[in-house]
Image (cartoon, rainbow, N blue to C red):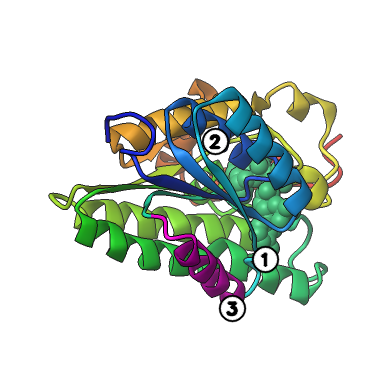
Amino acid sequence: MAGKSGDRGVALVTGASSGIGEEIAKRLALEGFDLVLAARRGDRLKELATQLEREHRTRAHVVVADLSSLEGAKQLTADVARLGLEVTVLVNNAGFGVHGNLADVPIERTLEMVQLNVVSLTFLTQHYVKEMVSGGRGRILQISSIGAFQPSPYYAVYSATKAFVLSMSEALHYELQGTGVTCTTSCPGLTATEFHKVADHEKPDWMNSLQMTAQEVARISVSAMLRGDRVTVPGPTNWLTSVLAQVMPKSLIIPMAAATMRKSAH
Ligand SMILES: NC(=O)c1ccc[n+]([C@@H]2O[C@H](COP(=O)([O-])OP(=O)(O)OC[C@H]3O[C@@H](n4cnc5c(N)ncnc54)[C@H](OP(=O)(O)O)[C@@H]3O)[C@@H](O)[C@H]2O)c1
């Protein structure tokens, strides 16, 4: 994947209008990739595209896409195809969480989350992995979460969507051996973005002090993707948490996750 801008093809980043996705787009521009920036808020994407084209020798295309339906995901691939670009990097970053008791959160919001975090991500992965394998090159970066490693009360379905992403993507990483294509999963922990506002989760102050910046998460995730790593967990504390979650009995780890995530944890 070495080479100057143009040789590397194009990186498609979903959820590039804020947070981790925006920082991944900046990082990839710095690495010399041209970009397709996708999300619903086109004004933010245009602003970012202008900034990237000004600051780097890169082309940045904007595609407004709502990935909360399969039709939206299909429309995105059709719009990218119309641009006549070879996607050599896919970053499946768009996603959101829903905080609260499973019994209380609106079912429509829960299903929209499953559609975005799981169904659209799977569709885009399958669509572009086929193209990449036939072209003999490509990188896929899936943004999962540290919540993928254990069941998380008050984020029950969100955590399950991220476990799906991790499991599918680790298997895909294996299947892709020898093809010239790799699939890397990044599992960030608490990161300072719009995520918790969107999830309707008012975090206690102690949680804010543990947050990583979106820039740092993006830097670590993109480096792992360019190396073709299977999984990365950004930050030593998050890495340790992910290891403990995999070795501790569920009877201990689930109440610990609950204590961290409950609404009244001020
Ligand atoms: N922040 C954390 O603590 C944390 C921790 C672990 C994992 N993550 C994961 O990191 C990823 C990025 O989240 P973030 O923290 O950067 O949060 P964020 O700032 O809220 O960014 C979410 C991005 O997803 C896009 N998006 C949401 N719904 C969409 C839809 N229906 N169609 C297309 N795009 C949509 C948003 O763009 P528009 O609103 O413009 O569409 C936005 O660009 C997510 O997958 C999240 O689960 C976050």
User: Which amino acid lies under the numbered mark 1 shown in the image of this protein?
Assistant: Asp
Quarter of the image where one finds residue 264 = top right
The mark found on residue 71 in the picture is: 3
Q: Looking at the image, can residue 96 be seen?
A: no
Q: Please determine whether, in this image, residue 82 is positioned above or below residue 93.
A: below
Q: Where residue 251 appears, x then y in whole percent? A: 54, 50
Classified by dominant secondary structure, the portion drawn in magenta counts as helix
Residue in the picture at 39% in, 33% down? 5
Question: Which residue carries the number 1 mark?
Answer: 66
Please state which of residues 212 and 131 is positioned toward the viewer in this rendering.
131
Label 2 Cα neighbours within 10 Å, binned few <14 / some 14-19 / many ≥20: many
Q: Is residue 255 left or right of residue 169?
A: right
| Helix, strand or loop for disc 1 | loop
Please state which of residues 198 and 253 is positioned toward the viewer in this rendering.
198
* Dot 3 or dot 1, earlier in sequence: 1
Q: Looking at the image, can residue 227 be seen?
A: yes
